């Protein structure tokens, strides 16, 4: 199969970003293809409505990004997170699409190797920047999920460790994104701030929590109940 090409504004041809889509709904697949092919430098090289078929497409086309509905399961019922882990070896990045703002699903997806999480309600608005970010090695999380996590933090501050209660709203947002696995650059992209500002927030977080590093700060937040998303998974990851 020929390498799909896109033209830059100067007329120079360059390879398009190759994507496969795993989505049970045929109408959604068609709309995604239409959105992605609108001069975005992205090209859908394969579509599948079932997990087994998606695996075949990945092997055949070697895409840079796979957009995968979280409901997609293999014939034996194996959840998509295992598919993600199996495919991570070929350097493909996976962008998970979910019908719901499922916090446990977010934790499993990120720990399974996914590069991002997109809420179905904002799929067509967020899909292009999401694909570009994960293809570049960053992590993308839908704004609606970030808002949900931020609001959860605000809701549980009463009665938690006094050190956590001293965090500002922005510091709390940064701590959530650290717990979600984002790098400083990813946090900066998500919050629209500079990486230097992120480092300053992190320094203040570590000071306020008396934490020795990022992992320690996340552990304090989970152990105190300040953050509850995927806590069991994150405890295993950070030891």
Image (cartoon, rainbow, N blue to C red):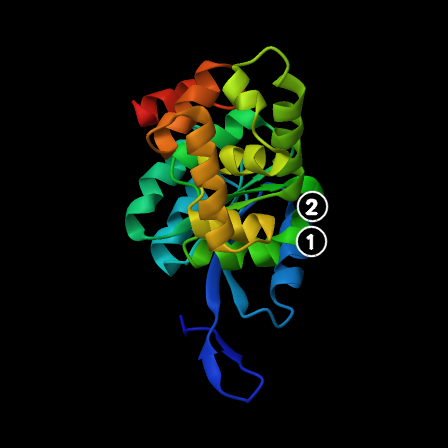
Which residue, given by chain and number where applicable, does mark 2 sit on? Answer: 122
Q: Secondary structure at mark 1?
A: helix
The label on residue 166 is none
Residue 53 point in image, percent of width and height: 44, 45
Which of the 4 image quarters holds residue 152?
top right
Q: Residue furthest top?
A: 159
Residue 134 point in image, percent of width and height: 47, 53
Q: Is residue 227 visible?
A: no
Residue 61 point in image, percent of width and height: 39, 60
Q: Is residue 151 visible?
A: yes
Which residue is located at x 62 percent, y 17 percent? Answer: 156
Q: Nearer the viewer, residue 75 or 40?
A: 40
**In the rendered image, the vertical position of residue 135 relative to residue 229, given as above or below:** below
Which residue is located at x 69 percent, y 53 percent? Answer: 125
Quarter of the image that includes the N terminus: bottom left
Q: Secondary structure at mark 2?
A: helix
């Amino acid at each position: 199969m020929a390498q799909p090409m896109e033209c830059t504004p100067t007329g120079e041809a360059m390879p398009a970003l190759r994507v496969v889509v795993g989505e049970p709904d045929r109408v959604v697949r068609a709309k995604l293809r239409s959105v992605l092919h609108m001069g975005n430098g992205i090209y859908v090289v394969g579509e599948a409505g079932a997990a087994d078929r998606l695996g075949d497409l990945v092997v055949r086309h070697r895409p840079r990004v796979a957009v995968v509905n979280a409901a997609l399961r293999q014939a034996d019922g194996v959840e998509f997170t295992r598919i993600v882990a199996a495919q991570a070896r070929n350097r493909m990045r996976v962008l998970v699409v979910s019908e719901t703002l499922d916090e446990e699903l977010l934790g499993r997806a990120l720990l399974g190797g996914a590069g991002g999480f997109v809420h179905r309600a904002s799929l067509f608005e967020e899909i292009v920047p999401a694909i570009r970010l994960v293809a570049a090695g960053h992590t993308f999380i839908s704004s609606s999920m970030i808002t949900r996590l931020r609001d959860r933090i605000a809701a549980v501050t009463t009665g938690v460790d006094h050190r956590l209660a001293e965090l500002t709203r922005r510091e709390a947002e940064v701590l959530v994104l650290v717990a979600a696995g984002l790098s400083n650059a990813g946090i900066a992209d998500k919050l629209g701030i500079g990486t230097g500002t992120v480092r300053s927030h992190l320094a203040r977080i570590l000071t306020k929590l008396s934490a020795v590093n990022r992992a320690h700060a996340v552990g304090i937040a989970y152990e105190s109940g300040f953050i509850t998303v995927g806590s069991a998974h994150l405890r295993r990851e950070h030891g």
